[in-house]
Structures are given as structure tokens and as C-alpha cells.
């Protein structure tokens, strides 16, 4: 992938600053150990008339088909040290120069020794910034950088154009809490993009947390997902957490997302852990693996829309698996033998709700912790918690939960248990939730007829008219 930023001004900026670890290929002159190995044209490396920065630029006139401006370094450079080839190009007097970039792994190139070519255009009369991730060179990968080539791609040559400020940008430093990188400027070796419901740009250069690139996610369909797949899968017990940075983009409101792991290419899903991404800022998200049920194998890591309506553009960067210590889960509150929902669904519990809108990471009205469930119900809609496998009813005496009735009035609800995924319903127990306050509800299991198995716990509208928004938190079996 290639990114271009236009600068039509003919001013001459000050010399570009180079970060520690960047490699200067050309800045007024060739960098140390670099030489001109160009072919099929005339190339003036000391041109002073059309210059982007400093005092000189390269003037290139390609007089034969597939001619190339070629800059060679001795010894070759390890590609793993860099993430980007970046330069400025001016298309000359008129028209558009049609060019491409590729890398030689050896002096002579040829099959297996030169990468695929990445095309770009250079409009006349303006300077254009060209930024090419090294990950775009993948056939074969640029494991060694021996020659960088800017080539005519038409077979007919190219009129005079100009190139300036050529450099290799250093790969980002691996953070201290990053045991196994997944994405740092590009996907790490062994990882693949298996995302769906996009498009998703894995080399965005406009909003970046660290390095040169981040992932721009555009979730255009409900439950779309960024998906990182590794082959072979990794042993879950080698890690304690998944860590990444997320930026909520520019659209108003928070991005509503969730994380889960797949232990197989298809299926083997863990429970989901919800989180929100605030617009206009970068926030680090740390997901302890115990919150995902300590998966034995990590095959795919997924960051997914949790609303069913997609999400506006947001950004993800610096994705890692870590074995750094994480805080243990907080002790459950009183009357909570088996947590069902404490900030997120507990391992093995799933959202099987129906006929309504249910946000399992609502952060506006919360009883304890960071999140609560925000529920808005259609007629006879239900907030449903499903556990796999089912639990023996005789291990418990009651269901406890906190409920907040929302802005006004009283929510009229009922609770019942299902002993199977479909059917096996107990009798219902009515509850009311006054507006503007949290109320703890405790329902003894004998009130449901002492069910032998607990497969689903349901909180349902009992009026047939639906229920305005209310909130549920701290759901437990006791």
C-alpha cells in the first residue's frame, strides 16, 4: 500500500529532521555507503532548480522503457530494522509520471532476489510525499535491502521529474510490556489479517500511536471485526493479557467494541470482553486472559463491533500478547458465589438476549466497577444470560442483581430461568425497578420452583409494551 500527501507550494523547507535509527538514503547527497546504480536515463544527483528541502534534489529523465533510478548500499541493510521507505517526488512540467518502487535483495536481483513492485503516480507541478510500508513488499519480503529502485512502469520511459529526501524509517521499538508483537507498524511474522466487514487499512499513516503506521478500522456492517490470525496457534498459558492502543476517531460518541479469542480458525470462541474507545485520544486497553476464560490456544484475536450496527472509523496500534503480571480479578461482592456479570460477562456466560437493545458496556449509569448493562426492550423483550455447560440448581439458593429504573417511571419486569437453551422455563417472578435509583433484587430459587438445571437466566418485559432504558449490574448466583 502507498500513501501520498500533496504539497503544491514551491517553497523550499528546512532540511528534514531524521529520527534516531532512520537511514538517510538521499538528503542533498547520497547517504554514507550509498551509490548511484541507475540505468536507462540521465540522473543528476546535484540538481538545484526544483528542490523540496535543503539545496539539492535528484533530477531524473528516463529515456528508455522500464528505466530506473537505483540507489545501492554496501553492505545491505536488514529489512527488519525498518518499516517504511519514504521520499518526496515532483512530477515535472506537465502530465503525471507513472512509476513504481521495488527493492533488490542482492546486487543483481532477478527471481527470488527482487521484491514485487508497488506503483505510484507523481503529478506535475507539485511535490508529493510517498510513504510505502516495507510490508507492501511481500513477494518475496524485503528481508535485505541492497538496492531501492524507482522505475518507469509504462515501458515507454518518463519525462523529467524530481526526487528528494529519500529515507528508510526505523521500525518501532518493541514496548517493554510486549512479549509477543502482533502488530507494530505491520503484522508480525506469522500473523495474518483475517478481518471481516471492512475495509480495514493496516498501513494508515494519519493517526498513529507509535512508529509510522496504525490500523484504520471501518466497520461498515454489524458485528464486523478486526481479526489477527497466527499460524501455528500459540499456547495461552504463556501469556497473561492482550494489550493494544485504541483511538476513537473523530466521530462523536464512543466506539462500542468487544474482544474475544478463537482457539481455532473457525469456532472455539471465548466469551467477549467489552470496552469503549473515546474519540480524539489514544487509550491503552489491557484484557487479562482470565477474563476470556484462560483459552488453552490463541489462534485468532478479534476486536469486534458489539452493537450490530457497525462503527465509525477508529484506529488500533501496538497490539501485543504480554506475560507481564496483571491485577487479579476483584473478589466477588457479598451474596455472589458464582459471578454472572461484573463489568463483563463471566467466562462461559453469553449474551442470548432478544427483542431489544442491550449494551453490556454501558458507562453512563453504573452500580459498581466500570460498566453496567444498558437495556431497552421491545414488547416482551428479554435480557438473557446463558451458561455452557448448565449449572446444577441445587448448588445455589438465590439469584441476586442490581437494577436501576432509568430516567422516569417504574420498569415493570419479570425474571425466569430456563433449564434448556430452548424451553424448560420456570414460572416467572415479577420485579419493579423505580427510576433514578439502584435497587438490589434477591430471588430465592424456590420461587422459581427449584429448577434442577440453570441454563439461562432471563429478565423480561412483563407488560407487552416494552420498557424504556434501564440498567442492570452485579448479577450473581448465590
Image (cartoon, grey):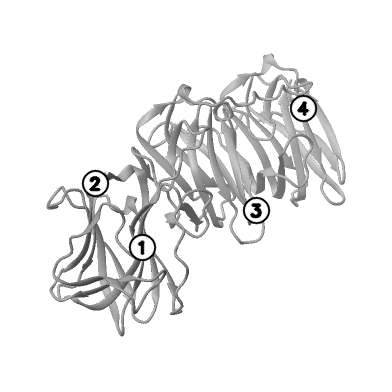
Secondary structure beneath disc 2? strand
Secondary structure beneath disc 1? loop
Which residue position holds label 3?
Answer: 254
Q: Residue at x 43, y 48 (%)?
A: 185
Looking at this view, name the residue that lies furthest to the bottom.
94
Which mark, residue 400?
4
Which mark, residue 474?
none
Q: Is residue 403 left or right of residue 385?
A: right
Q: Is residue 143 left or right of residue 376?
A: left
In this rendered view, identify the residue nearer to me: 440 or 5.
Answer: 5
Q: Quadrant of residue 390?
A: top right
- Lower position in the chain sequence, tag 1 or tag 2: 1
Neighbours of disc 2 within 10 Å: few (<14), some (14-19), many (20+)? some
Which residue position holds label 1?
Answer: 27
Secondary structure beneath disc 4? strand
Q: CA distance from mark 3 to mark 4?
A: 30 Å
In this rendered view, identify the residue nearer to me: 147 or 377.
Answer: 147
Q: Nearer the viewer, mark 3 or mark 2?
A: 2
The picture places residue 101, in percent across and down from the top left corner, at: 26, 61
Q: Nearer the viewer, mark 1 or mark 2?
A: 1
Q: CA distance from mark 3 to mark 2?
A: 46 Å
Looking at this view, name the residue that lies furthest to the top.
395
- Lower position in the chain sequence, tag 4 or tag 1: 1
Secondary structure beneath disc 3? loop
Q: Nearer the viewer, mark 3 or mark 4?
A: 3
Q: CA distance from mark 3 to mark 1?
A: 43 Å
Q: Nearer the viewer, mark 3 or mark 1?
A: 1
From what the image shows, is residue 82 above or below residue 415? below
Q: Quadrant of the N terminus?
A: bottom left
Which mark, residue 76?
2
Q: How many marks?
A: 4
The picture places residue 95, in percent across and down from the top left corner, at: 30, 83
Amino acid at each position: 500500500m502507498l500513501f501520498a500527501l500533496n504539497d503544491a507550494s514551491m517553497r523550499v523547507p528546512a532540511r528534514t529532521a531524521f529520527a534516531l535509527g532512520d537511514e538517510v538514503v538521499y538528503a542533498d547527497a547520497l547517504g554514507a555507503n550509498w551509490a548511484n546504480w541507475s540505468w536507462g536515463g540521465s540522473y543528476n544527483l546535484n540538481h538545484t532548480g526544483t528542490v523540496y528541502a535543503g539545496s539539492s534534489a535528484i533530477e531524473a529523465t528516463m529515456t528508455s522503457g522500464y528505466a530506473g533510478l537505483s540507489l545501492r548500499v554496501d553492505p545491505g541493510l536488514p529489512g527488519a530494522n525498518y518499516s517504511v521507505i519514504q521520499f518526496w517526488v515532483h512530477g515535472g512540467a506537465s502530465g503525471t509520471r507513472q512509476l513504481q518502487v521495488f527493492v533488490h535483495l542482492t546486487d543483481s536481483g532477478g527471481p527470488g532476489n527482487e521484491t514485487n513492485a508497488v506503483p505510484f503516480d507523481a503529478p506535475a507541478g507539485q511535490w508529493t510525499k510517498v510513504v510505502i510500508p516495507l510490508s507492501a513488499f511481500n513477494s518475496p519480503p524485503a528481508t535485505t535491502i541492497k538496492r531501492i529502485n524507482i522505475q518507469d512502469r509504462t515501458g515507454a520511459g518518463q519525462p523529467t521529474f524530481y526526487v528528494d529526501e529519500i529515507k528508510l524509517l526505523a521500525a518501532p521499538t518493541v514496548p517493554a510490556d510486549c512479549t509477543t508483537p502482533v502488530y507494530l507498524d505491520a503484522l508480525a511474522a506469522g500473523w495474518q489479517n483475517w478481518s471481516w466487514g471492512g475495509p480495514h487499512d493496516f498501513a494508515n499513516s494519519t493517526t498513529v500511536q507509535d512508529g509510522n503506521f496504525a490500523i484504520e478500522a471501518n466497520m461498515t456492517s454489524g458485528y464486523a471485526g478486526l481479526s489477527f490470525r497466527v499460524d501455528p496457534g500459540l499456547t495461552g498459558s504463556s501469556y497473561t493479557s492482550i494489550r493494544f492502543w485504541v483511538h476513537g476517531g473523530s466521530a462523536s460518541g464512543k466506539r462500542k467494541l468487544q474482544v474475544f479469542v478463537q482457539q481455532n480458525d473457525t469456532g472455539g470462541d471465548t466469551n467477549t470482553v467489552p470496552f469503549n474507545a473515546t474519540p480524539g485520544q489514544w487509550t491503552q486497553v489491557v484484557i487479562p486472559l482470565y477474563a476470556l476464560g484462560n483459552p488453552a490456544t490463541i489462534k485468532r484475536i478479534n476486536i469486534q463491533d458489539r452493537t450490530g450496527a457497525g462503527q465509525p472509523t477508529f484506529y488500533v496500534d501496538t497490539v501485543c500478547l504480554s506475560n507481564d503480571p496483571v491485577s487479579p480479578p476483584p473478589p466477588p461482592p457479598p451474596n455472589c458465589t458464582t459471578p454472572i456479570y461484573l463489568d463483563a460477562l463471566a467466562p462461559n456466560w453469553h449474551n442470548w438476549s432478544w427483542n431489544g437493545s442491550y449494551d453490556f458496556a454501558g458507562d453512563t449509569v453504573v452500580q459498581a466497577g466500570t460498566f453496567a448493562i444498558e437495556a431497552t426492550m421491545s414488547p416482551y423483550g428479554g435480557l438473557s444470560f446463558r451458561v455452557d455447560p448448565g449449572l446444577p440448581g441445587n448448588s445455589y439458593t438465590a439469584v441476586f442483581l442490581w437494577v436501576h429504573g432509568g430516567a422516569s417511571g417504574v420498569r415493570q419486569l419479570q425474571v425466569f430461568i430456563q433449564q434448556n437453551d430452548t424451553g424448560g422455563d420456570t414460572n416467572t417472578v415479577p420485579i419493579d425497578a423505580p427510576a433514578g435509583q439502584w435497587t438490589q433484587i434477591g430471588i430465592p430459587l424456590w420461587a422459581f420452583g427449584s429448577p434442577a438445571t440453570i441454563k439461562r437466566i432471563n429478565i423480561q418485559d412483563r407488560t407487552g409494551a416494552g420498557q424504556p432504558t434501564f440498567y442492570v449490574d452485579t448479577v450473581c448466583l448465590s
